[in-house]
Image (cartoon, grey):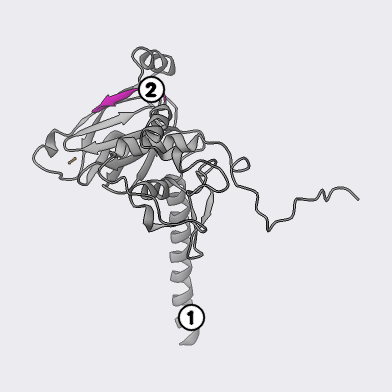
Amino acid sequence: NVPLEIAWTIVPAGIAITMFAWGAVLYFNMRTPPTRTMEINVLGKQWMWKLQHPSGKSEINELHVPLGQPVKLKMISEDVIHSFYVPAFRVKMDVLPGRYTYTWFTPSKVGEYHLFCAEYCGTDHSGMRGRVVVLEPAAYANWLRGDTGEPPEVVGQRLFEQFRCHTCHTNQENARCPPLTGIFGRQVVLRDGQVVEADESYLRESILNPNAKIVAGYQPVMPTFQGQIGEEGIMQIIAYLKTLGPQETAAPPNPNTTPPTDEAQP
Ligand code: CUA
């Protein structure tokens, strides 16, 4: 019976596609943080959580966040795989060595909540826990005061100079290394013609394994900083690189493009 065959193929296919589309929209909404998030750096190591606020204040095994403020966690591990788990927030994300992972949440109720490591990571895995404290915004501002450390980008700039990065990345036209002004988020053309986005993972890889992606027009002259700088320092350098201004001020003039003409004029 052809009409029957067609009907029981089309109808379930339609239902399945609807469920897939609905689920996909929900998934993308869940994974995409809102635009005005507060970004917290999370470092997992055997056996503790180290967290740093944008102001520079650090905490260990404790995370204080203001009520109603979307919080984005940028996470990486110094050693083995951990997992950042706050059951009350329905938030669980693996924290991996060698790769940034992200998660976000918006605290909606003042209180204290459990924080666990949800990936077996060695002897003291069960002790690798802490708490998330949600405060009223005023109380959070008050808590932030006091012995605030240096903001990550300030430490990052110091490291950038300490490791002598600025002697090669001079931002001048004939420099031996690519200019870094406005680097974050820019499209970078590599020697093999590939185009990649200079996101956090790219910057991190370029510090630890500079020869993995060589920018077009440059030689592989940069030494690796593997073993010389910890994950925390790398996050701080990336925070500094992000402050290096927008793209317009960065790129050296490209001789192949004509200057823009004002097309609004008749
Ligand atoms: Cu860290 Cu389990």
Does residue 64 appear left or right of residue 196 in this picture? left
- Residue 133 in view in this figure: no
Relative to 16, is 235 above or below? above
Indicate the position of residue 88 as horizontal and vertical percent values: 29, 34
Q: Is residue 66 above or below residue 266?
A: above
* Left or right: 196, with 155 as reference point: right
List the single residue furthest toward the left.
Answer: 123
Question: In the rendered structure, which segment of residues is drawn in magenta?
Answer: 55-62
Given the current orientation, which residue lies at the most extreme right position?
266
Left-right relation of 261 to 221: right
The residue drawn where x is 46% and y is 33% is 37
Is any atom of residue 168 visible in this view? yes
Q: Element under label 1?
A: helix
Q: Between 132 and 24, which is closer to the camera in this rendering? A: 132
Secondary-structure class at tag 2:
loop
Question: Residue at the location (70% across, 56% down)?
Answer: 257
Name the amino acid type tagged 1: Ile
Tag shown at residue 150: 2
**Residue that label 1 marks:** 6
Quarter of the rendering occupied by the N terminus: bottom left
Measure the C-alpha gap from mark 1 to mark 2.
67 Å
Q: Say which residue appears at 45% left-offset and 47% top-offset.
A: 199
Residue drawn at (45%, 55%) of the image: 24
Q: Residue furthest bottom?
A: 1
Could you tell which of marks 1 and 2 lies nearer the N-terminus? 1
Residue 47 is inside the magenta segment = no
Return the residue nearer the eye: 106 or 181.
181
